[in-house]
Image (tube, grey):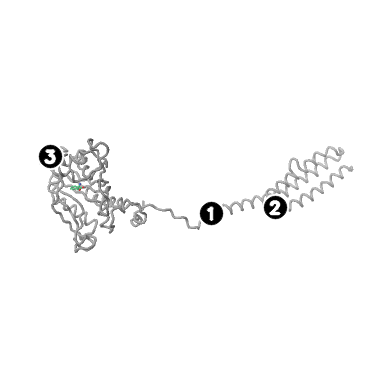
Amino acid sequence: MTDGSHGLSARINEVREQAIEELKSVSDGETLRDWERKWIGPKGEITSMLRSLGSLAKEDRPAAGRDAQALRSKLEAAFTPVQELIERQQMERRLAEESIDVTLPGRRPDIGAAHPISAMIDELIEIFAHLGFQAVFGPEVETGRYNFDLLNIPADHPARDVWDTIIIDDPAAEIVMRTHTSPMQARTMERLDPPIRVIVPGRSYRYEAQDASHEWMFTQLEGLAVDTNITMTDLKGVLQELARQLFGPERRVRLRCDFFPFVEPGVDFAVDCAICNGKGCRVCKHSGWLEMGGAGMVHPNVLRGVGYDPEKYTGFAFGLGFERLVMMKYGVDDIRAFNGNDLRFLKKFATVTI
Ligand code: PHE
């Protein structure tokens, strides 16, 4: 063994001790990488050791080479478990940081609910479905022909003044916001043949000063039945059933003469007050009755206007206001609340979630 190989084996021992010692104080990924670079990396201590083999005497090279390789294996073997440990620690730390507590109660989202008018529309569609009526919907912008003419309200008829109409654009063209859902009577009869049983829930508009009981936009429900042998009794039966479904089985309906150009005879209809059983209270303004709307037998002129033979067919029609109905049912005392967008009001009806 030459001096040179002595020097190398001393160096190997030194490197081993120092490297192992340093490995003990490695505590994170960064110092581990430094350690790897310094000792076993491609530019590390072992590599330079192997490069220096050339300066040894030829016969010493194989043994020295083996020793150096053995040292590399030893250092790599020592390195691996430390690397694994540090990686595991890093992973655990990340998991701890990123973990979520699934037992924590979530933030409750604000769940919307059907508007009281929409809920009432759904309720009425359901009630009338059981009576054989189908719901149809029509345009809110109408022509004078459907809103007035076909309803037996000619241009010079004084009844035309009954509705204060919101007119769209050119008054001569008579494009109006429909003042009631009745235009759907003619539209439906033009499209279908008897027997007809439809209801028309929808918005109507009148040019009106607002107060606690008047709105310029409101919701109506139109009803129309046309067939052979339809009589006033059928009308009363349907209205009676409606009142009972809405306000309970005890309710009675009252019909009184009234005038609407598109019905003959015409009536207004009321239901006895469910709050006081007809005795008189604040809700029914001490009359015992709650006014619901207008109704009557479809006027022969209306039937003729859509090409029906009034000798063959008869029918009844009725119209009622939704807002009034909901106000009566839930004791709301200001119609403006419906479109006021005050959540405190709307949430009181939040039983139907959508
Ligand atoms: N359209 C009438 C109104 O708005 C109500 C009504 C409908 C009356 C059908 C009779 C028949 O006042």
Identify residue for label 1: 100
Q: Which residue sits at x=73%, y=44%?
A: 37
Q: Nearer the viewer, residue 94 or 331?
A: 331
Give the amino acid at mark 3: Asp
Identify residue for label 3: 309
Would you call the spot at circle 2 few (<14 residues within 10 Å), some (14-19), or many (20 or more)? few
Would you call the spot at circle 3 few (<14 residues within 10 Å), some (14-19), or many (20 or more)? few
Identify residue for label 2: 27
Image quadrant in which you'd find residue 241: bottom left
Q: How many marks?
A: 3
Q: Where is residue 156 drawn, in percent x and y?
A: 15, 40
Q: Earlier in the sequence, mark 2 or mark 1?
A: 2
Per the image, label 2 sits on a secondary structure element best described as loop
Give the amino acid at mark 1: Ile
Q: Nearer the viewer, residue 316 or 249?
A: 316
Mark 1 and mark 3: Cα distance apart in space: 74 Å
Q: Where is residue 89 drawn, in percent x and y?
A: 64, 52
Left or right of 195 in this view: 331: right
Mark 2 and mark 3: Cα distance apart in space: 100 Å
Image quadrant in which you'd find residue 46: top right
Q: Which residue sits at x=19%, y=53%?
A: 239
Task: Mark 2 and mark 3 in contact? Answer it, CB < 8 Å.
Answer: no
